[in-house]
Amino acid sequence: MKPIWIVDDDQSIRFVLEKALLREDLPTRSFTNAREVLAALEVAADDEQQGPQVLVSDIRMPGGSGLDLLDKIKAKHPGLPVIIMTAFSDLDSAVSAFQGGAFEYLPKPFDLPRAVELIRRAVDESQREEVAEERMAAAPEMLGQAPAMQDVFRAIGRLSQSNVTVLITGESGSGKELVARALHKHSPRTNGPFVAINTAAIPKDLLESELFGHERGAFTGAQTMRRGRFEQAEGGTLFLDEIGDMPFDLQTRLLRVLSDGHFYRVGGHNSVKANVRVIAATHQDLEQRVKLGGFREDLFHRLNVIRLRLPALRERGEDVPALTRHFLQQSAKQLGVEPKRISDAALVRLATFGFPGNVRQLENICHWLTVMAPAQLIESKDLPPEVMAVHAVDVPAAHAPALQSTMPTVEHEGAQSSAVAAVVVPAASVAGADAGVPGAWESGLEIEAQNLLAAGRTDVWDALSRRFESRLILTALANTRGRRIEAAQKLGIGRNTITRKIQELGLE
């Protein structure tokens, strides 16, 4: 394991932390100022194992402040957790530390067990990010852990050498355009253009011209000839989103193009040949629309050659943690700030939210958190009101515990990318997050153990036992308002046992 780097000009602070971390089997390396650290990082650049797992730095030191050091480290090592220590516990220092991307802020004098526990959390975060980066580097353009997404990927693979018309169905915000782009990219038309149009977003009077173009003088304001989307997509793919909202008379024109491959511009007299593959999408039940007379049956059958159903986000809860981490990274990049991290408890709460707006809603939530969350680590209490106000009852029980480390498809209109991995704790550890689902916390525990084992950890038993016992004791103490004897009685253990455990686990 890589060492914990300690930076402080106070020899006594370095000594105390070194001894405490050594008792936890955490190797250390100490420095007296920022210059030494930066020089050591340059040397370690050639050998990653020589670099730090976590860096703990004082804020005020000769030869450069801890905040300056934080800025320089984050510029070159953005994933390295940095804990800032200071005896000057003022608001400005705390704000500056978090704005600079610090993992946590530790005021002096600090309680040693709590400092060690904080460093242990930072180590867990660092190892989790390392696994995520490795998987990100190896990830294909689209990847989803949920079985329903795997079905979509298999269908894309089967259609990779085909020009057949495809109908994509799914709720709004579930990422239908992303799938359409993937179908185009993996088709023989990949070198041609991909043109998308939302038929529900364009007024009826303009939609015909948008699709088929118009000749000069075809109507008032048509001062020049204009090529429509069918001509713009020549040799490529035309994506017709929300096809269920297309006006009935235009459905007839679309059917004709799909039937014989020719169309007329508005006001034109010469037919234009369309060499275009059509992919359509809708959130509506087209069979029901046909029965109600709102959609042509012959056009429905012409479009419904191959149908791909895209799952709603609530059907793929295991993909939420990875998508969340990706969107937080994406939001931070757009805003030019340090990416925020999200706690396991907050991830569990998010994963059990129903997401009526699907992936688009999750992306918006991540934008909101990037701006509004007060600290670098997002906790459950920082989640937006719509998440906190709804008890997690919308999601099938099978999805809430199944929060595996994944790098799924980012289902976002007009974009595609992969997301980083996530490790979560049992759902029972989060207030209000489906704690009552039978077997939920055991499933979460199993998943957490699988992730730690996959990361190469050799202290899984101790790590999870400490977290389990800590959570159990803290919950009992909260229930008894801090009365230890009563808490011990409720837990079924002795008074001396709970006292010893509180000391061992640093829960004083």
Image (tube, rainbow, N blue to C red):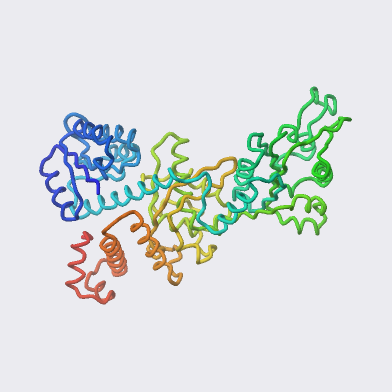
Splitting the image into 4 quarters, where does residue 98 fall?
Answer: top left
Splitting the image into 4 quarters, where does residue 463 fall?
Answer: bottom left
The residue nearer to you, when weighing 59 against 487, is 59
Quadrant location, the C terminus: bottom left
Q: Is residue 62 above or below residue 137?
A: above
Q: Tell whether 370 sits left or right of 72.
A: right
**Could you tell me residue 495's position as x and y percent?**
19, 73
Q: Residue at x 83, y 24 (%)?
A: 216
**Could you tell me residue 431's position as x and y percent?**
40, 62
The residue nearer to you, when weighing 427 against 1, is 1
Splitting the image into 4 quarters, where does residue 500 fall?
Answer: bottom left
The residue nearer to you, when weighing 478 against 239, is 239
The residue nearer to you, when weighing 124 against 16, is 124
Residue sitting farthest toward the top: 223
**Could you tell me residue 427's position as x and y percent?**
41, 63
Q: Residue at x 11, y 41 (%)?
A: 11
Q: Residue at x 80, y 59 (%)?
A: 291
Q: Is residue 323 above or below residue 268?
A: below
Q: Is residue 425 above or below residue 299?
A: below
Q: Residue at x 70, y 50 (%)?
A: 167
Residue sitting farthest toward the front: 161
**Could you tell me residue 376's position as x and y percent?**
36, 44
